[in-house]
Image (cartoon, rainbow, N blue to C red):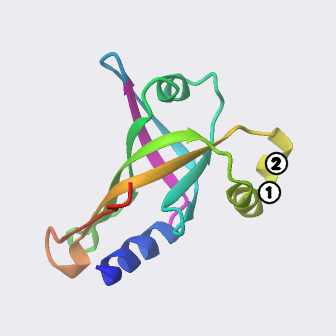
Amino acid sequence: MGNDLEKITAFIEQHHVLSLATSLDNLPSVCSAFYIYDAQSHSFVIASSEETLHIKQVKVNKNVAGNILLETKEIGKIQGLQFFAKMQALEDERLKKSYFKRFPYALALLPKLWQIEVSRFKLTDNRLGFGKKIIYEYTSL
């Protein structure tokens, strides 16, 4: 199972933008965000204004889903990651420092940071065989 998690983490670290889906009262919302990933806490960190629809929804319904993908037309190279998580305002100072280290220009905007703590990953990687799926669930959540 450790090797699967290493493949998932390696894929995440090759990218920097995720799509995030939220929902409240049958009203879905989706956005794209720059992220950092912290393997220790199995969390993404993003910046987003409290005025956005997706953050207003998260304040009521913390359950979110998202994806990261490699855009390609070559079937044999298709890769994509889906995740399920809970999202809340970021309080961890270590993660805040990591975010601003990766995106120092964001500090000038004083953005609100959010933590997306993942409970389940599903990585599709056609390089390992057509339709190959790697699923990893955290049991400690």
Q: How many marks?
A: 2
Q: Residue furthest left?
A: 130
Residue at the image position 68 percent from the left and 58 percent from the top: 95
Q: Secondary structure at mark 2?
A: helix
Residue 58 drawn above or below residue 9: above
Give the labeled residue for mark 2: 107
Residue at the image position 32 percent from the left and 56 percent from the top: 120
Give the labeled residue for mark 1: 104
Q: Secondary structure at mark 1?
A: helix
Q: Residue 67's spot in the image, x, y percent? A: 38, 51
Q: Residue furthest bottom?
A: 3
In magenta, the rendered stretch is 15-23
Q: Residue 2's spot in the image, x, y percent? A: 34, 81
Q: Residue furthest right?
A: 108
| 125 left or right, relative to 36 | left
Question: In front here: 66 or 140?
Answer: 140
Residue at the image position 71 percent from the left and 62 percent from the top: 98
Q: Quadrant of the N terminus?
A: bottom left
Question: In the rendered structure, are the residues bearing label 2 and label 1 in contact, judged by CB atoms less than 8 Å apart?
Answer: yes
Checking the image for residue 34, the label placed there is: none
Q: Residue 125's spot in the image, x, y percent? A: 26, 71
Q: Amino acid at mark 1?
A: Pro
Q: Residue furthest front?
A: 140
Considering the whole magenta stretch, tell me its main secondary structure: strand
Question: In front here: 55 or 72?
Answer: 55
Q: Residue 136's spot in the image, x, y percent? A: 29, 66
Q: Quadrant of the C terminus?
A: bottom left
- Whether residue 20 appears in magenta in the rendering, the answer is yes
